[in-house]
Image (cartoon, rainbow, N blue to C red):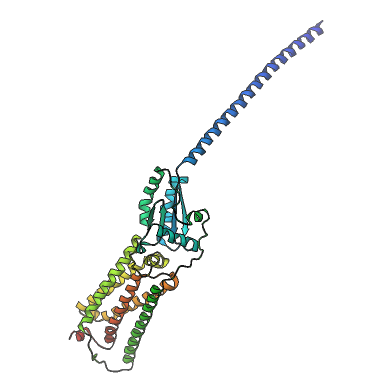
Amino acid sequence: MSSLVIWSTCIIVFGMLGVLAVRERAKAMQAVKVAVRSFFGILSIVLAITGLTNTARADAPVVHAALFYDLECSHCERVREQVLPPLQARYGDRFVVTQLEVNSDRVYDVFLAALDRFAVPPEMRGVPFLVIGDDFLIGDQDIADQLPGLIEKYVATGGVGYAAIPGLEALASAPPPPGEPVHRGADPVANALAITIMIGMMAALGYAARATVRSRLALRSGAPRQRIAERRPAWRDWVIPLLALAGLCVAGYLAYVETTATPAICGPVGDCNAVQSSAYARLFGVLPIGVLGAAGYMAILGTWVWNRFGNGRLSELAPSALFGLTLFGVAFSLYFTYLEPFVINAVCAWCLTSAVIMTALLLLTTGPASQRSTGFTKQESQA
């Protein structure tokens, strides 16, 4: 009897547990169904939002621009490293700029086509040169000042593609690697002029060296110091400051062009902007050549005033100082003039003008320096 009760109790308990298990299983299955439905519902929402975002991005206005630059141009470097990165970070995919180095035959041809497309005057042609829509910008300062406003203008009008310049879109899709060589058309007139001036400078250096050696040899031989039989005309003394002032104007203009990235007015001969944008336009990559030239002409002017109106032993040394300054100036001008037709492959008319002025100053100051070494003094020249 007791066994029957026990077995009956066990059967009832297990039966109840079985019922509870079936109910819990049904609830679990229902929970799984709810979870699966929720997952697919959330996934659908995420996919919908992603699709809307992509559609919005696809419909967002995009502004395309092209920057022509030279690896040796410090103004180009400023645009590439300081001006463009903040704008690209700000606009993201809405601002696409293709950077094209002009030291490539393909890029250089498109660059010339772009200059012709916008009718850029010869005296303003140079790099950095940026094309955006129907606008162009030359020089790092203009690009830094005006490019943000142009981007906003074209974004507001629904974006803009690359300018209608033959070959530009093809270059933008497959730009050539940096360093690809370029073969620019030489300017025979400018090159001939530069070489002629080089020959004249070398002749002037030879004349100055001959005069200096002769005076030194006369001193070493123990020959008596004699006055110069033919005194220099008075006008020669006043030509020196006039030439130095003219050279200061030329060098000052070049210094202004180099420090402000303003396109130079070159005239019909040469390509001043190509020279001024080259790596050789700055001494050691830091000091603009125009600034160095302006300092040299100011030193020549100061030394002339010192010689003309000063007194004492130091003023008597001024002719030798003038000779040394002009000698260095001609030697440096000769080196830079050589670079133009043979290395830079462009000639700067302003630089050639400065070279001619410095050569004339050397010829004018060679006489006084030689006379000073043989006992000729300022008082004798004014007698």
Q: Work out which quarter of the rendered image holds the C terminus and state it.
A: bottom left
Q: Who's the residue at 27% across and 94% down the image?
A: 224
How many discs mark residues in the rendered view? Answer: 0
Q: Along the horizontal axis of the image, is 280 left or right of 178? A: left
The answer to whether any part of residue 149 appears in the image is: yes
**Quarter of the rendering containing residue 187:** bottom left
Q: Position of residue 347 (x, y in %)?
A: 39, 70
Which residue is most to the top?
1
Q: Work out which quarter of the rendered image holds the N terminus and state it.
A: top right
Q: Is residue 68 above or below residue 213?
A: above
Q: Position of residue 209 (x, y in %)?
A: 35, 85
Q: Is residue 295 above or below residue 148?
A: below
Q: Position of residue 117 (x, y in %)?
A: 40, 57
**Quarter of the rendering containing residue 317:** bottom left
Q: Position of residue 323 (x, y in %)?
A: 30, 80
Q: Is residue 96 above or below residue 247?
A: above
Q: Is residue 358 above or below residue 267?
A: below
Front residue of this view, candidates 325 and 281: 281
Front residue of this view, candidates 122 and 264: 122
